Image: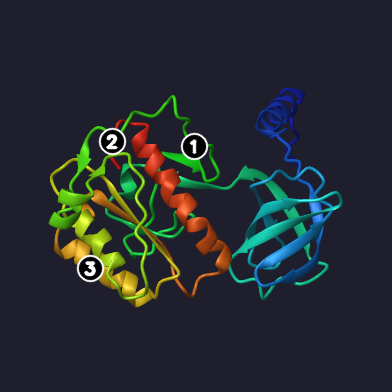
């Protein structure tokens, strides 16, 4: 029977100590008080931040976002199926604020409000994560509107021209052509060094697929991103969709791109 020498024992101990990970993770743990319609009220998360992501121990690791902070509980919107979440289940904080991946790899893709691909073209690796609830640039940081954005619709371009950097509301009843105006404007940006982001909120999956096909057939997906929260998606995801789309747009804006 062989015996280990003192030097060998010392070497093994040193090797194990070198591999020992001393990093610890501290999470607040709370309990579900009530849950209804995609909203949960959690007791015990005393150090939770507004906008922080939390994880439910429901067997699917469902994620939610803290929106309402009260003295002894927090209100959380649930991203995903909330039917498996019940009173008494454990919830823990993640110390991560709600964000969406942004980068050049998103161009030509269809994603949901948390950056997950919906087009079946594989995973997307963003250059960086952008906070969804980020403060908008102030007036001092903004340039005046001085360059036109051609929509390709003569009546608009001639009578009520739109400038790059301008906000424009398209309002009207159902089936009056609001989406058609937006799509025509996107198609007209081909070759003009403009990145277009189309955000679909609460639309039918088939309608979004038809819009994407139109953009692909006309070569517009080469400079476009589609952020979609369909009618079948939970209400919190639909709530998040415009924030995610704007956050992605601000990523390109900060790099000198027209969006």
Sequence-earlier tag: 1 or 3: 1
- In depth, the one of 47 and 4 nearer the eye is 47
Instruction: Determine crowd level at label 3: few under 14, some 14-19, many 20+ residues with C-alpha closer than 10 A.
Output: some
Residue picked out by circle 3 = 213
Above or below 58: residue 22 = above
Task: Report how far apart the C-alphas of labels 2 and 1 lie in the structure.
Answer: 17 Å
Above or below 174: residue 99 = above
Task: Report how far apart the C-alphas of labels 1 and 3 lie in the structure.
Answer: 32 Å
Query: Horizontal and vertical percent for residue 82?
Result: 65, 71
Q: Which image quarter: residue 171?
A: bottom left
- In depth, the one of 259 and 44 nearer the eye is 259
Q: Is residue 214 visible?
A: yes
Residue at (20% x, 60% y) in the render? 184
Sequence-earlier tag: 3 or 2: 3
Residue picked out by circle 1 = 136
Q: Do callouts 3 and 2 mark residues in contact (Cβ within 8 Å)? A: no
In front: label 3 or label 2? 2
Query: Horizontal and vertical percent for residue 99?
Result: 53, 46
Query: Horizontal and vertical percent for residue 142?
Result: 39, 29
- In depth, the one of 123 and 173 nearer the eye is 173
Sequence-earlier tag: 2 or 1: 1
Query: Horizontal and vertical percent for residue 111?
Result: 39, 58
């Amino acid at each position: 029977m062989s015996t280990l020498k003192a030097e060998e024992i010392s070497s093994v101990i040193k090797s194990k100590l070198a591999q020992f990970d001393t990093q610890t993770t501290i999470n607040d743990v709370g309990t579900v008080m009530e849950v209804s319609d995609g909203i949960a009220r959690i007791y015990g998360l005393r150090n939770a931040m507004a906008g922080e992501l939390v994880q439910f121990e429901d067997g699917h690791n469902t994620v939610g976002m803290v929106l309402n902070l009260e003295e002894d509980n927090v209100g959380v919107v649930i991203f995903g199926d909330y039917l498996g979440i019940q009173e008494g289940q454990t919830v823990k904080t993640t110390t991560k604020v709600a964000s969406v991946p942004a980068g050049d790899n998103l161009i030509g893709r269809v994603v949901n409000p948390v950056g997950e691909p919906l087009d079946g073209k594989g995973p997307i690796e963003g250059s960086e994560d952008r906070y969804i609830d980020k403060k908008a640039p102030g007036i001092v940081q903004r340039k005046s509107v001085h360059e036109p954005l051609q929509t390709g619709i003569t009546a608009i371009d001639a009578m009520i021209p739109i400038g790059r950097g301008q906000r424009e509301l398209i309002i009207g009843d159902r089936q009056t052509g609001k989406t058609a105006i937006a799509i025509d404007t996107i198609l007209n940006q081909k070759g003009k060094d403009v990145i277009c982001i189309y955000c679909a909120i609460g639309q039918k999956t088939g309608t979004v697929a038809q819009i994407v096909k139109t953009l692909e057939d006309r070569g517009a997906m080469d400079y476009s991103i589609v952020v979609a929260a369909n009618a079948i998606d939970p209400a919190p995801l639909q709530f998040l969709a415009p924030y995610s789309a704007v956050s992605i747009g601000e990523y390109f804006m900060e790099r000198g791109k027209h969006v």
